[in-house]
Image: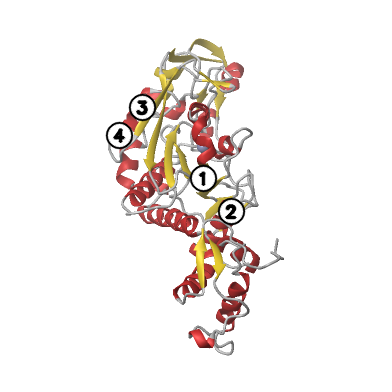
């Protein structure tokens, strides 16, 4: 994963651009991928595909020709989708168009104005502080041309057409944690899923430019939406913060319960929070009206209250390979695979027994004197096995992890006491639990 990051991170991957295409074509060499293309001007629901944007050259000079800032030295020096501009400007006018990072004086900020057209440069606060002359020369040579927005799609067929969506964006020029880490983890997860002999769900991994890419894909694949039962957006997976799971627009959905309870079992130091409270990305398009696919989001984000949330180097030139590690990427891949394993196993537990099970008779009794927690979980899980609760439902009710319930349910299954079902199968005459 780090090799791919090192190869692709510095590309100028603006939403519709030569370098975005280069990065996507390179990723398509890693895994079977279909690339969808949407031409400039195409209407996608309420949106329109923008032009391809190219910056040939951009710099800021003093009037006596001293170069202060040059796009050739860093792609973030120009506002993404900046209008072309050339001229001598007053210091006041320059400062209106010169963006700096709010808290990192040595960082160039990532600023974009895709639809609200304007010209702009981005600099370090340190450079901005040295600008004391009355006038400066600005040169921004950018081009807006017809092109095609591209979305990469990896399909991993399952036994069921019901589909779990994985989504990551690729459109952050010369940055790593946001967003390339989500892309490379997504590809590794897809590869692992493809290598397995069997899956219940179909999985689709989308690699796209943020927001407009999701709208373009969804608006041209409306026939697939009814089968999209759940999803997970991936980004910021290589930095040194705890895993954070952001819930979907549907906090009571099975996928919300399942993934939240499973993450608790996988990474006890992680945390979960509500929709739109951790970080906002493409999951918004999937949860939105007319689509309504419950999509959660997984990232490594500093806990609520941290002054550098989501992480210190976010949207800046300091988001480089130096802040991610192979170990943390691997760890994130394991978390995603663990969440999907739980999703595959989130079945209704149907009792093939009546009354309380004679645990000693089946050799599964746990002595409450030596293992009080084991005893409690065993009996409380058995109590909820009635064909009306999934593993996730039981974990939620017992305030425990998905894995703890799965372990007991698997044991009961191995003793012939329960079986699993994809649909509810109530076994009590009056279904009193409903
Ligand atoms: Zn971002």
Mark 4 in CB contact with mark 3 (< 8 angstroms): no
The x and y percentages for residue 260 are: 57, 57
Say whether marks 3 and 1 touch (CB < 8 Å): no
Disc 1 versus disc 4: distance between alpha carbons?
25 Å
Q: Which label belongs to residue 325?
A: none
Dot 1 falls on a residue whose secondary structure is strand
Instruction: For marks 2 and 3, give the CA distance.
Output: 36 Å
The answer to which of marks 1 and 4 sits earlier in the sequence is: 4
2 or 4: mark nearer the eye: 2
Pointer 2: what residue?
Answer: 254
Residue 224 pos. (x, y %): 49, 35
* Residue 251 horizontal/vertical position (percent): 64, 50
Dividing the picture into quadrants, the one containing residue 99 is: top right
Instruction: Label 4, secondary structure: give it.
Output: helix
Quick one: label 2 or label 4, which is nearer the N terminus?
A: 4
Residue under label 1: 231
- Residue with the mark numbered 3: 21
Residue tagged 4: 26
């Amino acid at each position: 994963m780090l090799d791919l990051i090192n190869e692709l991170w510095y590309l100028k991957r603006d939403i519709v651009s030569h370098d975005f295409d280069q990065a996507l074509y390179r990723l398509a060499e890693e895994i079977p991928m279909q690339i969808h293309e949407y031409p400039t001007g195409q209407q996608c629901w309420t949106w329109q595909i923008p032009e391809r944007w190219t910056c040939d050259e951009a710099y800021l000079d003093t009037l006596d020709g001293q170069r202060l800032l040059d796009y050739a030295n860093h792609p973030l020096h120009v506002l993404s989708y900046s209008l072309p501009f050339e001229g001598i400007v007053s210091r006041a006018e320059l400062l209106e168009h010169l963006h700096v990072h709010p808290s990192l004086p040595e960082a160039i900020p990532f600023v974009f104005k895709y639809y609200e057209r304007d010209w702009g440069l981005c600099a370090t606060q340190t450079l901005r502080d040295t600008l004391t002359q009355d006038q400066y020369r600005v040169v921004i040579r950018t081009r807006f041309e017809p092109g095609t927005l591209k979305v990469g799609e990896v399909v991993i067929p399952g036994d069921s057409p019901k589909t779990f969506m994985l989504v990551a964006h690729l459109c952050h020029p010369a940055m790593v944690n946001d967003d390339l880490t989500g892309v490379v983890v997504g590809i590794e997860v897809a590869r692992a899923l493809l290598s397995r002999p069997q899956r219940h769900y179909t999985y689709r991994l989308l690699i796209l430019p943020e927001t407009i890419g999701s709208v373009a894909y969804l608006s041209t694949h409306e026939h697939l939406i009814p089968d999209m039962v759940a999803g997970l957006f991936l980004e910021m997976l290589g930095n040194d913060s705890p895993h954070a799971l952001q819930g979907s627009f549907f906090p009571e959905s099975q996928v919300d319960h399942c993934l939240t309870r499973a993450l608790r079992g996988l990474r006890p130091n992680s945390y979960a929070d509500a929709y739109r409270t951790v970080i906002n990305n493409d999951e918004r398009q999937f949860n939105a009206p007319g689509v309504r696919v419950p999509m959660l989001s997984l990232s490594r984000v500093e806990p609520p209250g941290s002054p550098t949330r989501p992480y210190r180097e976010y949207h800046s030139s300091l988001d480089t390979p130096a802040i991610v590690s192979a170990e943390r990427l691997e760890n994130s891949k394991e978390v995603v695979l663990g969440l999907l394993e739980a999703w595959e196993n989130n079945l209704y537990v149907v009792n093939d027994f009546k009354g309380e099970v004679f645990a000693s008779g089946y050799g599964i009794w746990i002595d409450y004197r030596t293992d009080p927690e084991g005893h409690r979980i065993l009996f409380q899980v058995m109590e909820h096995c009635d064909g009306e609760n999934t593993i996730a439902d039981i974990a939620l009710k017992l305030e425990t992890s998905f894995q703890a319930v799965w372990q007991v349910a698997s044991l009961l299954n191995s003793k012939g006491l329960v079986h699993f079902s994809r649909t509810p199968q109530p076994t009590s005459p009056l279904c009193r639990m409903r």
